[in-house]
Amino acid sequence: MKMNKVDLSFQSCKSTYEEADVVIFSVPMDATTSFRPGTRFAGNAIRVDSIGVEWYSPYRERDLNEFKTADVGDLDLPIGAVEDALEIVYNTTKTILKDNKVPMMVGGEHLVSYPVIKAVFESYPNLHIIHLDAHTDLRENFFGRELSHATFMRHVHKFVGDKKIFQFGIRSGEKPEFDWAKEESGHIFQRKFDFEGLDKVCEQLKDVPVYITIDLDVLDPSVFPGTGTPEPGGMQYKDLLWAFDQFEKLNNLVAADFVELSPMLDPSGASTAVAAKTLREMVLLLQKNLEKRK
Amino acid sequence: MKMNKVDLSFQSCKSTYEEADVVIFSVPMDATTSFRPGTRFAGNAIRVDSIGVEWYSPYRERDLNEFKTADVGDLDLPIGAVEDALEIVYNTTKTILKDNKVPMMVGGEHLVSYPVIKAVFESYPNLHIIHLDAHTDLRENFFGRELSHATFMRHVHKFVGDKKIFQFGIRSGEKPEFDWAKEESGHIFQRKFDFEGLDKVCEQLKDVPVYITIDLDVLDPSVFPGTGTPEPGGMQYKDLLWAFDQFEKLNNLVAADFVELSPMLDPSGASTAVAAKTLREMVLLLQKNLEKRK
Amino acid sequence: MKMNKVDLSFQSCKSTYEEADVVIFSVPMDATTSFRPGTRFAGNAIRVDSIGVEWYSPYRERDLNEFKTADVGDLDLPIGAVEDALEIVYNTTKTILKDNKVPMMVGGEHLVSYPVIKAVFESYPNLHIIHLDAHTDLRENFFGRELSHATFMRHVHKFVGDKKIFQFGIRSGEKPEFDWAKEESGHIFQRKFDFEGLDKVCEQLKDVPVYITIDLDVLDPSVFPGTGTPEPGGMQYKDLLWAFDQFEKLNNLVAADFVELSPMLDPSGASTAVAAKTLREMVLLLQKNLEKRK
Amino acid sequence: MKMNKVDLSFQSCKSTYEEADVVIFSVPMDATTSFRPGTRFAGNAIRVDSIGVEWYSPYRERDLNEFKTADVGDLDLPIGAVEDALEIVYNTTKTILKDNKVPMMVGGEHLVSYPVIKAVFESYPNLHIIHLDAHTDLRENFFGRELSHATFMRHVHKFVGDKKIFQFGIRSGEKPEFDWAKEESGHIFQRKFDFEGLDKVCEQLKDVPVYITIDLDVLDPSVFPGTGTPEPGGMQYKDLLWAFDQFEKLNNLVAADFVELSPMLDPSGASTAVAAKTLREMVLLLQKNLEKRK
Amino acid sequence: MKMNKVDLSFQSCKSTYEEADVVIFSVPMDATTSFRPGTRFAGNAIRVDSIGVEWYSPYRERDLNEFKTADVGDLDLPIGAVEDALEIVYNTTKTILKDNKVPMMVGGEHLVSYPVIKAVFESYPNLHIIHLDAHTDLRENFFGRELSHATFMRHVHKFVGDKKIFQFGIRSGEKPEFDWAKEESGHIFQRKFDFEGLDKVCEQLKDVPVYITIDLDVLDPSVFPGTGTPEPGGMQYKDLLWAFDQFEKLNNLVAADFVELSPMLDPSGASTAVAAKTLREMVLLLQKNLEKRK
Amino acid sequence: MKMNKVDLSFQSCKSTYEEADVVIFSVPMDATTSFRPGTRFAGNAIRVDSIGVEWYSPYRERDLNEFKTADVGDLDLPIGAVEDALEIVYNTTKTILKDNKVPMMVGGEHLVSYPVIKAVFESYPNLHIIHLDAHTDLRENFFGRELSHATFMRHVHKFVGDKKIFQFGIRSGEKPEFDWAKEESGHIFQRKFDFEGLDKVCEQLKDVPVYITIDLDVLDPSVFPGTGTPEPGGMQYKDLLWAFDQFEKLNNLVAADFVELSPMLDPSGASTAVAAKTLREMVLLLQKNLEKRK
């Protein structure tokens, strides 16, 4: 009888960091959340509940067991120190990329995507971003701060430049944000309310490096009540699965994340199940993409 | 540093009553509720949580800040005294109408729509009513009472007359109610299960005075679990947004309400978010309509 | 003033066993549940909350009051003794069939369908099974056990034989299960992800004896969060209502069940409302079918 | 195999009305509740959860099985019609007393004790009342109504007269209520904050007819969060058990009730467990008292 | 019929700032919370639920209506900017003191007491502090930050000096914190686990200026589950009421606060009721003290 | 930047099995639970939430960091196979004892204590057992089974013999159980309702090998609502801390467990906090005892 230490890695993602191709890490930060906080608990909630999720995906027709994925857990972050925390997220991503592995980040609030995208951009200067979200996240500043969950994509735009960001599902924001995002401005592509056109965008981005960031509140609150700022009128989970089918077309998916699960807000566990299944699908997308690229 | 009293008005609806065009009031009454009570808490729950909702609507493409809306809060009602409470609701509505303002009522159980519609009818004798609901609310009486949440629309019919009420989304009631509502009876228009035909009805009612009453349980319980009598098989929030698009066709929308949020029943806050967004959309509909009419 | 004992039968299903055509019984067992238990409480939760559900169905256009249905309550089962409990379920079903009544079983975990189907099969050797579920339930064994909620349909196949089982809505399982179920294997019919083709299958099975078993987790967790293993990407309640319309085509519907409500997991009561409405629809389907057969 | 109708009587209280000595009935009414409603669901919640409570009491050292107790369930009440509902409660109590049985009532809001006490008083004109509660319930009127949960004991005083009511545990009310209750007024005995003196009062009332009414919110909200108006600073459950020990001294306990469980407010089930255990203890008190009197 | 703006001031505390003696303000900040956040919602939750609390206190034997108290609501704070937020809290307190009013602050996390105490100290250089808490809050730094909820009292010590801080109820901390607090160190007075000695301390501090700060997690989690870091083994609410009786001895109570209600964590509302009653008692303490000083 | 696998060991108990003195393991089994299941989730819930608990105990005045404790996590158990699961628990305990380490087990339902005590007894034939519980657990059989959570201590008695078991806090059971436990029977020592006499028993058992098993439902449901069979009238957490002080007297504490946390039943997290603190105290008790014995 062998006695090992507790292992609560996500599902069967039990490779060591050294042997893994894809590396899951979670970021327990919700410091700039404006309404209900709690996304800091997402990573471990998903890990514990992943016992209820199959390793095989009938959508991707692959099994997590076929691949080498590591789960390095929650990053260790200073509390209440936004800049320091973002620095740690950035450094972690840099390390993973330097080691030739694919980062798969689990938030936390959406601001934590910023340092990940920044690090990935430094490796892939032609980076394109597919961004599924209920909210524009395009404010110039928010409650007097430049960097927050409500502004971060505007700041990503500052380094990736025009025509690199493709937003879908957006249904909440201030008027200036929507104006800035209009097609004639030439800054970004923005599809309001649904995923229409995502198939064509994936076709178009087939051969460029792509980062996918999903704020799970793009889903309708019925599907995903466990989030801080529920925004009715969102997507069904089947729509997200359709989006994942489109992502299969991409030949150069270099990293990904999803954010904004706040597990305390949905004690039924359904929202955590949504996140766990999303993580399975995204890891499989990244792994299959890697196969293609080898 | 100026010190003001607490102001928990809905979102940015901070005009005084005197300067406002549209007046929000809420009715904390659930006295005839037959299953789970709790709608009395709806108004203040929406107010407190409205901090999580944007003032700008990408659907209506307008911002609440552009308009003058007052929120006069919960009416002060006697507890357990149905008739007295309804009288107060009636008088409040009369006052608002007399002052040439548009009433926007937030329930409470659906019975509280009765005195509001009665008061509005007295100002607009040709009043037509669009009624979105899971339940017929057409019983002759209910547990021995003439006026209750389950009978009120039958009693509205008594004063507005035939062919003035248009129901959509109905999926629960007793057989005699459905029979009474059949087209051949000539009493009312009733569309079961969904909103099909609502676009044509809005076209048809374009120039007559219209009152909109929405029992939020017309939505599926997945979208809106925070209600006393959940009735599976309902509408998605996107369907309701489509209905609001149809309402933009109306040229004479004279008052409106929505009812039946019971916030305690959904501690995730998603149902309250549904109600808060609905209130934003309905205030904008009323305000845009008023602009048209000026 | 007559004083009777407490009667918490489902809705108006207050016939005695002797006078009834259809007999509701519930099975308070969740002993092999692998993730969140609690389905043992389903039967009584549905009974108590059925006060919130109308007796008339606008879908079936019939009223429960028109029929004679008995509700004999929760079976009395030994705790933690799987085989003994299944034996009791089996014997109960045999008795109901022997008395020329139609069994309507309410789970419990899905394993409890096994003895019911076995008993029904012994009366109807040409039995066909329509199975709505998120999960394949086709494992050879599960955690070392032959009979469990995750294996039971594979074991049903052992006695009903090839081409008798028709699965719809399946979206979770292990790869070998999906392989075993493939059309070319000739074992069963399996439709993944949705109900497409259910109308044709009902046409095809019009005149053979049919058993319907519904794992309510075939519904999306948004619609039905109160279940132990929520699997995102499921069906809407309107889809289930459409399925019930197809079931009206069957001329020989001999028994039915639904399973896997865990009421504690959804304190809003919405999941219990889904189950209560499903029970009303299924009793009406069985009763209308019986009328046809008389 | 015998098939009976569902029987969800409280624990083993399965006697028929005719054979019973003590009769449990519950009153699903919360119409005058001023804060959070929901006590209408208490009776059936206690019945369903009584499966988790032993029939034997190590405090009373007796077993419910030794006695003949009937449970006639929830009374059938009109909704929203306070006076009519109270009339039904009154008539039910009269019938039970006329049939020489002991009434054990389970609320509902505290107002429902009024008609029970009235009926019991008519049989026992020298009736004394022991009243455990957090709230005085001694207002002259409340929101314009004479009869409500906040006034009912003042109105009981009108017919029982001075020095018949003994309150314990009171910690909330308006100043005039406390003034009216002061010893020098000679109206009632009132012990604030705890049960001190209850032992002596029980000694003193040993041989007169006594009615016990317990508002379970006399318990601290930690012990009993499932109530509409939680009032911190209350009693522990052990204190209540001590009170029950004192009640054993009474030789003429003629009826009893407890009220104000709102089971929806405590989904953990702990508050319902408190109520179920209280019901067991009170039935045993009534039955043992009856033995003494025989 | 007069139409006013929504007024959700705490209970009857409806004086304007100008006319008030005591000023309630709440601080919606939980930025340095290390475990479960959510205290930002405390102020408005207390306001809305204060409808369920009487204005008269049988403990203080006074009524809130007898006094002039203003409630200026939640301060408007930048999100995620700890220093800026603390500055606003400090300035608010300074203004209230400058205007000769008594500040009554409602947190928020415990760190928000720091700027309030600092401002009060600047008016009363001989300030003594009575601190009820489960946690020492005496770390030198916490996750690399000097100012956090876990360090703030150590930093208060830096300006008030030795022998000015009196802690009670402490039952959690790191060893160095307990060592630093030992009597022989001469820094502060610390009573572990309970309130023993609080009566003597109040006697001793009778005539010096005193600030009371209460972390409500000093209460047992049974009494107060709605807090981010529940620490079993705490005080009953009756103990806190006893402490308030001791506080009546003070002749120079110059300001007060309580902190750490996280209302989302206790949907039963019991924790919010605890906080609302505490606020009533503390306002009455401050008002009665002011009477004494006039 | 070093990348490790997820480590969710309890608090700072991060030693390897090989280097550890005390070994924590958890048993995710609730198969014979008669009322509300869910204790299978206790172990990981405690691990994840232990981030909110200090490593230093001011009661034991020691820090977990001073000792070498391993946490080997949840045992891997077959579902629904009671005997097989108990065998695995037994073998695990045997292994730990054989390796000269002290077992600290976390349940699961109380039946899982049976194989642990059996294995410990085989190493210490003079084993005495201190058993804190609300329930006797002394039935001969339960629902037809010999081994269940309600019978297990009776079966422990069969091998440890008379006068070896010391029960405290018992307040629920059947009459025959209480009769069997009476002093004159000479089987066991049983203290009903509270911990009186525990200090003397600890004195008396000072030098014999002692096993402590704590069913956390010995605590009042107010303190610990997160358990399947809440039994009002229990102990405060301070009483349990006092019991731990008595346990310090023991010189030969050879193993321990606590059981019956069902974390889903208390989403506030307070019950999990109770369990986490209990685990900290019990590990420190075991470690300090080991120091004494070295």
Image: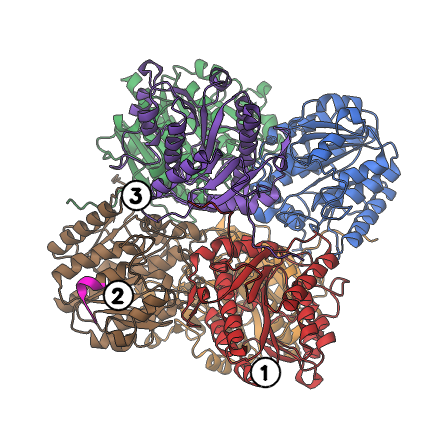
Chain colours: A brown, B red, C orange, D blue, E purple, F green
Q: Are marks 3 and 1 in contact (CB under 8 Å)?
A: no
Which residue in the protein does label 1 denote?
A: B205
Q: Which of the 4 image quadrants contains residue F247?
A: top left
Q: Is residue B242 left or right of residue A283?
A: right
Amino acid under label 1?
Leu
Residue sitting at 54 percent across and 55 percent down? B263
Secondary structure of the residue carrying numbered label 2 = strand
**Residue at mark 2:** A62
Q: Secondary structure at mark 1?
A: loop
- Chain ID at mark 2: A
What is the chain letter for disc 1? B
Instruction: Name the residue type under label 3.
Output: Gly
Asked which quadrant contains residue B58, the reply is: bottom left
Q: Work out how far the residue at label 3 is from the one at label 1, CA to CA, in angstroms.
A: 56 Å
What residue would you read off at disc 3? Answer: A80
- In terms of depth relative to the viewer, which is nearer, F256 or D220? D220
Magenta-tinted stretch: A157-163
User: Quarter of the image holding residue D174?
Assistant: top right
Q: Are marks 1 and 2 in contact (CB under 8 Å)?
A: no
Q: Residues within 10 Å of mark 3 (few under 14, many from 20)?
A: many
Q: Is residue E259 magenta?
A: no
Across and down, in percent, residue A246 comes to 27, 73
Question: Quick one: E48 or D205, which is closer to the camera?
Answer: E48
